[in-house]
Image: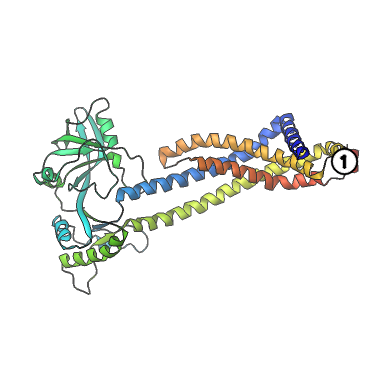
Amino acid sequence: MYKLYISITEGIKIAFQAISANKIRAFLTTICITIGIVSVTSMNTITDGIDRSFDQSLSMLGRNVVYIEKWPWGFGGDYKWWEYRNRPEMKLEYAEQIRERSRYAEDVAAAASRNRPIRYKDSFVENVEIVGATANYLKPTALEVEDGRFYSEDDNTRGAYMIVLGGEVAETLFPVENPIGKEVRVQGKRFQVIGVFKKQGSSFGTENVDNMAVMPINTYRSIFGLRWGLQLSVRFADEQALQEGQYEIEGIMRQIRQLDILEDNDFAVNKPELFKAEFDRMTSIIYLIGIFLTGLALFVGGIGVMNIMFVSVKERTKEIGIRKAVGAKSWEILFQFLIEAIVLCLIGGVIGVVLSLGTTKLINEFFVAYMSWTTVLNAVIICSIVGVLFGFIPSYKAASADPIDSLRYE
């Protein structure tokens, strides 16, 4: 066992000495691996970022919730927008009718929105999503009020001019002040800020909730009206209630709309699962492109390592012959060159991971990305595998060399 330990440590020492003696060549070789690892980690950070952002989007949409609206979610060749646009709009009274008739629904909320600027003194934020919603709006979502409070049913009934701001909106309008109790202007009307939502960060596929402001729906109706864009959200207690309840809700809506048995629905019952199906179709394309590009980059990097290792074996042919003549076994020679290939790849991998940190921040400016420790670990494992795969043939050639021919090599 001690002899094995000495052989391994000696092999590692010789491998590092060989790399140190050819710094420029080693650096040029690691560039290929660095490019490959940057490609791999960047692809992983994008896919991880998409997955995390999508989970966050589902949380915003709510669990065990269906949404009743005029337009169905999704796009594609079978999306009959010309038919959907002629459907009648949702009405606020539908929420109460569904609540009274449904056996499975735990709660029914309603909301509509417009994009408008919000002003505070000389400051303003453009294109804020102004949402008018019932007092139970937060129940199906992951939105949290971090400071202040949300409005009550009584506030909604009397049409109070109160508003709850998204995190980004509050930070922009009140960089140094506490927004609670201050008055902002929306559509020329004064609203008292009663709360601020906890910042959620960027999400994928849904509206930016940090750039949002919510007011009572009766107040919203008095300003903007509810002629279009109303959405009803029906929340169920659990998954089982959802499975039964979604069909019940469809039947109730058909009764409300007085549709004949042969008539198609003139409304849509949208579920987050449908959003997930669209998401899966889109991300599968991203994954396939990413796998191809990262595989190509790593293959090019591996070929570069193999090429340099063949050169290294050729240059050290006499050294191999001397080591074998004094008793070194073939596996020790093989191990030495394999370690050299793996170390070359790991050096490139470390540089690649460091560069990927900057790449992740850059991607986040335009898209979504997230680097986890799993991504870093995967990069190290991939570097080791590339080193073994592409370093094995040159290492095996060195290990199987004839000692007499090697000693005669000039």
Which type of secondary structure does the marked residue at label 1 adopt? helix
Above or below 185: residue 245: below
* Residue 184 coordinates in the image, percent (x, y): 17, 33
Going by the numbered disc 1, the residue's amino acid type is: Ser
* Residue 199 coordinates in the image, percent (x, y): 31, 37
Asked if one can make out residue 230 in the rendered structure from this viewpoint, the answer is no
Q: Which residue lies most toward the top here?
A: 176
Residue 280, image quadrant: bottom left
* Residue 216 coordinates in the image, percent (x, y): 15, 44
* Residue 254 coordinates in the image, percent (x, y): 19, 67
Q: Which residue lies most toward the front here?
A: 1
Asked if one can make out residue 105 in the rendered structure from this viewpoint, the answer is yes
Q: Disc 1 designates what residue?
A: 406
Residue 119, image quadrant: top left
* For residue 283, side relative to residue 241 (left or right): right
Q: Foreground residue, 190 or 379? A: 379
State the quadrant of the C terminus.
Answer: top right
What residue appears at the point 29 percent right and 37 percent down from the top-left corner? 198
State the quadrant of the N terminus.
Answer: top right
